[in-house]
Image: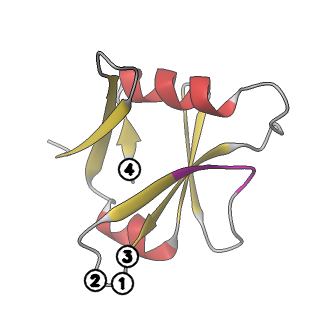
């Protein structure tokens, strides 16, 4: 199952706990058709077939294809100098 670093958990929590968002809000990751790239967006909740990853108060929803591809990965995140969030994947040891 996808795991999150402490930085990723913190950033996902910051994104998804903004005023006006429901308690079910999370980050949703979807795989494109050939599974070589992913789309990441804040979502009010997951879709019925999504795998839910909850870690350190952060919630991530993975569509079925993303869940398979990211099963052995670690999601990291950082904020660059301009305030943009950057996500990175690594293979779990």
Q: Nearer the viewer, residue 27 or 19?
A: 19
The reply to whether discs 4 and 2 touch (Cβ–Cβ < 8 Å) is no
Which residue lies at the image location 31% right of the left edge and 33% below the top edge?
A: 76
Q: Residue 56 got which mark?
A: none
Disc nearer the start of the sequence (4/1): 4
The reply to whether discs 1 and 2 touch (Cβ–Cβ < 8 Å) is yes
Q: Residue 32 got which mark?
A: 3
The reply to whether discs 1 and 3 touch (Cβ–Cβ < 8 Å) is yes
- What secondary structure is the magenta-colored segment mainly? strand
Where's the N terminus, which quadrant?
Answer: bottom left
Tell me if mark 3 has few (under 14), some (14-19) or many (20+) residues whose alpha carbon lies within 10 angstroms of its own: few
Foreground label between 4 and 2: 2
Q: Which residues are magenta?
A: 41-45
SS under mark 3: loop
The reply to whether discs 2 and 3 touch (Cβ–Cβ < 8 Å) is yes
Which residue reaches farthest top?
A: 81
Residue at the spot of label 1: 33
Which residue lies at the image location 29% right of the left edge and 76% below the top edge?
A: 35
- Tag count: 4
Q: CA distance from mark 4 to mark 2?
A: 19 Å
In the drawing, does residue 90 fall left or right of residue 35? left
Q: Nearer the viewer, residue 84 or 92?
A: 84
Q: Is residue 32 above or below residue 84?
A: below
Foreground label between 4 and 1: 1
Q: Position of residue 50 (x, y in %)?
A: 60, 67
Disc nearer the start of the sequence (4/3): 4
Residue 3 lies in the magenta stretch: no
Where's the C terminus, which quadrant?
Answer: top left
Q: Is residue 55 above or below residue 64?
A: above
Residue at the spot of label 4: 2
Residue 57 location, quadrant: top right
């Amino acid at each position: 199952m996808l795991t999150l670093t402490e930085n990723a958990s913190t950033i996902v929590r910051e994104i998804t706990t903004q005023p006006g968002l429901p308690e079910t809000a999370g980050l949703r990751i979807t795989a494109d058709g050939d599974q070589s790239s992913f789309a990441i967006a804040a979502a009010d909740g997951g879709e019925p077939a999504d795998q839910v990853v909850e870690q350190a108060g952060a919630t991530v929803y993975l569509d079925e294809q993303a869940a398979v591809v990211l099963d052995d990965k670690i999601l990291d995140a950082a904020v660059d100098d301009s305030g943009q969030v950057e996500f990175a994947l690594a293979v779990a040891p």
